[in-house]
Every structure is written in C-alpha cells, then in structure tokens.
Image (tube, rainbow, N blue to C red):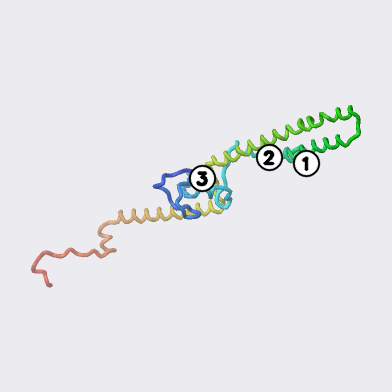
Amino acid sequence: MSNEYVKRKVALKDMNPCMICSKPATTVLFNQTLKDLIYTCDIHLIENPGFVVPIHSQEYNSTVAELQRVKLQLKVQASNGSGSWDTWVNKIFTKRNSSKDSENSDDTKKDETPTPVKEDQDKLPAIDYQSEYNKLLDKMTELQMKVRNFKLNDNMFQHRLQTKKAQQIAIAKRKKEEANYSNTKPEELEKVFSFPTVPSNDPNKKGQ
C-alpha cells in the first residue's frame, strides 16, 4: 500500500469531525490504494510531522536550495562588513570625519572624495541578494500553501493499515455468514430454529 494521501475539499453538508481535534472539518486526506479517508483541519497539516509530512514538488525543493545559497551569500557579506546598510552608512561618516581632522593636502582630499562612491558600488550586490532572498522566500511560502500530497507518520500509517485489514476481515466474515444462511434449506432451518405456529380459526379447537 502506498503511503500517499491527497488533500481534497468536501461540501459543508459532507463535513465530518476532524480526526485530531474532533471539530467539523471539510478537508479530507484520501488514499487511493487504501481507500482511506481522513478528515482534518487545515492547521493540522502545517509543520506537524507527528501526523503528516508534506510531499513537496521539485520546484519547491529547488527554491529551498536556491534560498539557502542566497542566505549564505548574505552571511558572507555581513561578516565582511558590507552586508548591512547601517555598517555602510557608518563607514561613510567615519571616512568623512577622518578627512576633516586630517592635515593632508588638497590633492589627498580629492583622492579620498570618491571613496563613498566605491562603498556604494560595494553595497549594490548586497541589495540585490536581499531582494532575491525576499522573492525566493515569498515563492517558497506560496508553494507550501499549494501542497496537495502528504505522507502519514509511519506509526499512524501502520495503524490505519491494521484498522483497514480488520474491517475487511469483518466484512468478509459477515458476507460469508449471509451466504451460508441464504444457502441453507428450509428443513434444516426448522431444526435449528423454533418458529411460532399460526393460530387456528377452527371454533371447535378454541379452549383446548
């Protein structure tokens, strides 16, 4: 049996108690191979490995990998002192104050003038990485909300399997009993069961 459940929605008239909290639920997890239905609230499907684990698409996995790469780039830039806007601004003011206190020649000051422009150029990749990170984060969240396939917790899935097998055995036993009963001859049924007799309409037999 495949441990894969598909998320579906049912009408309000068909809702049933949630398996987790017993509140009315219109969300159903359906297993095609097991013919199993589990009613649940949507909130129980979010970060709940004790119940279910989402089966993400390849697009989601690629987005997560790219998000980790961009996040690492942001950490590297932050460790180099160029990944923070506040750090960049502080550097500019520090250099400006140093130039005012310095007794260097005018030529030296002119040479130092373009420094903030260089810092601005160094900052551009950090801004791009931050923007890319935010976009990837939004995309990952959007893909999380679109997940329709889930895998039950292994222990819970084994419990569902055992429950289904017990139900199938009970159904098969009942069908066998019904078949045996329908195939039994009337004479044999009379020997097993005592059927009541129909009262006689003969007035001479009254009171006997």
How far apart are labels 3 and 1 at the CA level? 44 Å
Residue density around tag 2, few if under 14, some if 14–19, many if 20 or more, within 10 Å: some
N-terminal-most mark, 2 or 3: 3
Q: Amino acid at mark 3?
A: Tyr
Q: Which residue is mark 2?
A: 68
- Circle 3 sits on which residue? 5
Dot 3 crowding, Cα within 10 Å, few <14, some 14–19, many 20+: many
Relative side of 101 to 194, left or right: right
67 in relation to 47, above or below: above
Pointer 1 or 2: first along the chain: 2
Taking the spot 53% from the left edge, 44% from the top edge, the residue there is 4
Disc 3 and disc 1 in contact, CB within 8 angstroms? no
Q: Which mark is residue 79?
A: 1
Label 1 SS: helix
Element marked by disc 3: strand
- Which of discs 3 and 1 lies nearer the camera? The answer is 1
Question: Nearer the N terminus, badge 3 or badge 1?
Answer: 3
Kindly identify the amino acid type of the residue bearing the numbered disc 1: Ser
Residue 174 visible in the picture: yes
The image quarter containing residue 137 is top right
Observer-nearest of 10 and 176: 10
Of 156 and 18, the residue lying toward us: 18
Note whether residue 62 is visible. no
